[in-house]
Image (tube, rainbow, N blue to C red):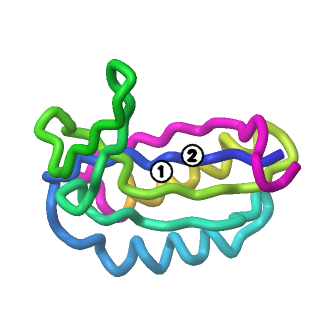
Amino acid sequence: MRYLVLIHVDENAGGEPPEGLIDAMFAHVADQSHAKVITDAGLAPTSAATRVASRDGEVVLTDGPFAEAKEVVGGFMLIDAPTQEDAVAWTRGFVDLHVEHWPELEVVTELRQVAGSLTDG
């Protein structure tokens, strides 16, 4: 089953991730004992984002940054795991790496099973 891991961070926390964290994340992605990473990406800051929304029957564009957003989606991973428990274990391992290597950064993940796709049938 496929799961989307949304990685929420405080965009104003600042700083670059420690090198040890990057190395540990590469190792975590390579370890497929709980899940296989299909794709992943970090996202540019909200200052470079545009919201496209519908309001009152109209399409509304809003350029970032968005003042009301403290925690934002900083990245995502699409994983394939045999069970929900495996997906949770994999995601917990990802968060554990941040606790170990960058404890001052608060990371919140949201794990959601993919329910359908327009391109995969």
Q: Is residue 117 magenta?
A: yes
**Does residue 94 lie above or below 17 as drawn?**
above
Under circle 1, the secondary element is helix
Q: Categorize mark 2 by other alpha carbons within 10 Å: few (<14), some (14-19), many (20+).
A: few
Under circle 2, the secondary element is helix
Residue on which the image places disc 2: 92
The label on residue 95 is 1
Residue 27 pos. (x, y %): 60, 75
Q: Dividing the picture into quarters, in which one does residue 120 lie?
A: bottom right
Left or right: 94, with 87 as reference point = left
Left or right: 24, with 117 as reference point = left
Left or right: 112, with 108 as reference point = right
Residue 23 pos. (x, y %): 47, 80
Return the residue found at the far front. 57
Give the main secondary structure of the magenta stretch: loop
Residue 36 pos. (x, y %): 75, 63
The residue at 19%/51% (across/down) is 63
The label on residue 117 is none
Left or right: 107, with 109 as reference point = left
Which of these two is toward me, 96 or 6? 6
Q: Categorize mark 1 by other alpha carbons within 10 Å: few (<14), some (14-19), many (20+).
A: some
Marks 2 and 1 sit apart, C-alpha to C-alpha, by 5 Å
The residue at 40%/71% (across/down) is 21
**Does residue 98 lie above or below 84 as drawn?**
below
Query: Quarter holding the N terminus?
Result: top right
From which residue to which does the magenta span run?
101-121
Kindly indicate whether the residue at mark 1 contacts the one at mark 2 (C-beta within 8 angstroms). yes
